Image (cartoon, helix red, strand yellow):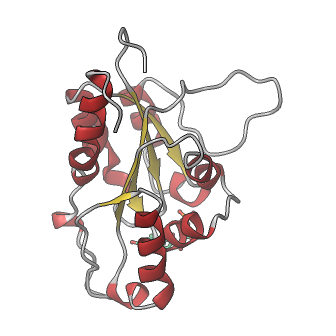
Amino acid sequence: MSEHRAPFLYIVVCAAGVADGVSELISAAHKEGWRVGVIATPNALALMDQEAIEALTGYPIRSGWRTPGAPKPLPPADAIAVAPATFNTVNKRAAGISDTLALAVLCEAYGPGIPMAMQPYVNSALAAHPAYAESLARLRSMGVMIGDFAPHEANSGGARATYNWISVLDLLRPVIQAMRSGLST
Ligand SMILES: Cc1cc2nc3c(=O)[nH]c(=O)nc-3n(C[C@H](O)[C@H](O)[C@H](O)COP(=O)(O)O)c2cc1C
């Protein structure tokens, strides 16, 4: 990270019911000094106000691969926040599947050690599947920080009111403070 520019945060948005609330996280990240670019899964795009989010970040939302030779729409990431993280993307990221741009970015971040925090949004019926706990354990073993979300009851209408968008920023704060002071983590 350059000393002379604000750090850049990728916010990866998956297709969960709260996806349209991501502007809360973007605004909070801006207040903490991050520049922000959004990467949405193809299914998440339809759930978001794309124009409003692009106006807020100042960058195009990325969702598909660019053509060879086309300029990179976003600067490189200093850290990545995944919120909301679906059951689908949690499991695929843990398994190393990269069939969306979002998953490819998440999978590629492991090699260079880009700090990553994920805040799931998953109901209790999905969370009961053994793959979910196994995926979270694998992600933690890979250094991914997992937020404080507890699965909400299935068919309860969700947990929109209590979904903690800021959890990912809380998790990434020590990492970015260490980067700013030139320490390694
Ligand atoms: C309106 C709507 C709300 C959804 N909410 C959730 C959710 O809260 N959590 C979840 O894991 N999946 C949810 N899903 C299912 C996911 O969208 C689906 O598994 C999809 O394949 C996820 O794709 P992605 O992980 O690439 O974003 C929802 C689907 C729709 C249409």
- Examine the image and state in which quarter residue 70 appears: top right
Residue 79 in the image: state x and y as whole percent: 42, 38
Q: Residue at x 44, y 32 (%)?
A: 78
Residue 146 in the image: state x and y as whole percent: 33, 62
Q: Is residue 52 left or right of residue 169?
A: right
Q: Is residue 116 left or right of residue 182?
A: right
Residue 24 in the image: state x and y as whole percent: 25, 44
The number of numbered badges drawn on the structure is: 0
Q: Is residue 43 left or right of residue 115?
A: right
- Between 96 and 149, the one lying in front of the other is 96
For the N terminus, which image quadrant?
top left
- Compared to 14, does 68 lie above or below? above
- Examine the image and state in which quarter residue 7 appears: top left
- Examine the image and state in which quarter residue 76 appears: top right
- Compared to 132, does 115 lie above or below? above
Give the residue at the far left of this rendering: 162
- Between 115 and 66, the one lying in front of the other is 115
- Between 145 and 178, the one lying in front of the other is 178
- Compared to 155, does 115 lie above or below? above
Give the residue at the far top of this rendering: 4
Q: Residue at x 49, y 68 (%)?
A: 90
For the C terminus, which image quadrant?
top left
Q: Residue at x 71, y 60 (%)?
A: 99
Give the residue at the far front of this rendering: 184
